[in-house]
Image (spheres, rainbow, N blue to C red):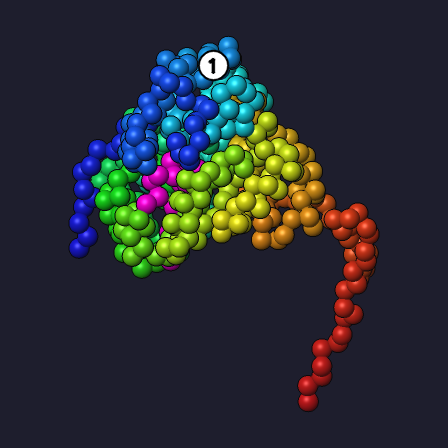
Amino acid sequence: MAASLPVIAPPLPPRVDGKAPRGVDAKAPRGTARDRRDWRWQLRHAVNSIEALERALPLTPEEREGARRAVSEGFPLSITPHYLSLIDRDDPACPVRRQCVPRAEEASEVPGDLRDPLGEEAHEPVPGLIRRYPDRALLLVTDRCGVYCRFCTRSRLVGDGGGSIREEQLAGALAYLRAHPEVRDVIVSGGDPLVMSTERLSALLARVRELPSVETIRLATRCPVTLPQRIDRALVKALRPMHPIWVMTHFNHPKELSKASDRALATLVDAGFPVMNQTVLLRGVNDDAEVLEALFRGLVRRRVRPYYLLQADPVRGTGHLRTPIDAGLAIMARLQGRLTGIALPRLVVDTPGGRGKVPIAPEAIVRRATGKTTLRTFRGEEVDYLDPPAHAAPSRR
């Protein structure tokens, strides 16, 4: 019989590579090189107050107002020293900065904004478990992250102080999965499950792995981007016995491909963890074909498969970060045929209300006639494809 999860307090919400970080000033905590390699130190010294943010960056009025709201009434603020070091402190339009520094626009709602855009609450058969598809389910194991991305789909619940999943919630989720063996794939998410201690996370995954119907476990984490120090030998050694585990991570811009991230990804892949990336299309961050081409090529060089390019979910207060669907289609049209297939993700819209993901693509069919389809190639050429002729079934004697 499996042991219960150890009772370990979750870490508090919250230099990487040889260069002095532009995003951290002399008043910000530096620590020794050994400190900076410690993921717990990174979490303890994450920026989570207006005062700390103003010491680290010269804020615009919009950022200052956004930070004030975040710490007092809104979606919380947290930026690890590593992720802070990737920010250009002199550029308010820095693509890393736009992802993690709150802005006053978060108080604004636009048509289509939703508190729970993916209808997760309506698809939660037991607390902490979300099932929107026949063969897979999402297990939410913590509400904590190292960095709270300003476009987060679950901004309604992450960082609310609950911490790691309670034993009774986990028991209820496991009982549901045991009673529904058609669920073969469990995505472990949150928050970010890798901000949990290695002992607690490995104990939790061992409980999931005991279910004979669960074929695949996926770990949804942004730690390779925001807290790469977390990916160490002790972690992969503890999790390797639960294979197959796929890691679903989330790089949005080439600036995030740091040396520390390179080490983290190599540690995962070398230990047998396939890594897939889901990029969210964001206004002023990566809504540009050249930027995304550089990102996707960089990921493939690091043995990471670009999996989805996601239309940003219509989360309340994120209208300033979202793009129209036509922007994604135009980008994919530019990348198709110019970017190797293994580096080309699918453009996907996760439909509001929890109806599931819908892949979309630039229109390639020009016209159709009986037995003939005219296609448009990435060069703009029109080419006819002829269906094979219909043949009568062979007679039998």
Q: Nearer the viewer, residue 300 or 379?
A: 300
Q: Is residue 228 magenta?
A: yes
Q: Is residue 62 magenta?
A: no
Q: Nearer the viewer, residue 235 or 357?
A: 235
Q: Is residue 218 visible?
A: no
In percent of the image, x 71 and y 81: which residue is there? 394
Mark 1 packing: few (<14 Cα in 10 Å), some, or many (20+)? some
* Numbered disc 1: secondary structure: loop
Residue 199 in percent (x, y) is at 23, 44
Name which quarter of the figure residue 227 lies in: top left
- Up the image or down, 362 lies above or below 91; here it is below
Q: Is residue 101 visible?
A: yes
- Up the image or down, 36 lies above or below 56; here it is below
Residue occupied by mark 1: 58
Residue 385 in percent (x, y) is at 78, 60
In percent of the image, x 55 and y 33: which residue is there? 312
Q: Nearer the viewer, residue 262 or 169?
A: 262
Magenta segment: 215-232
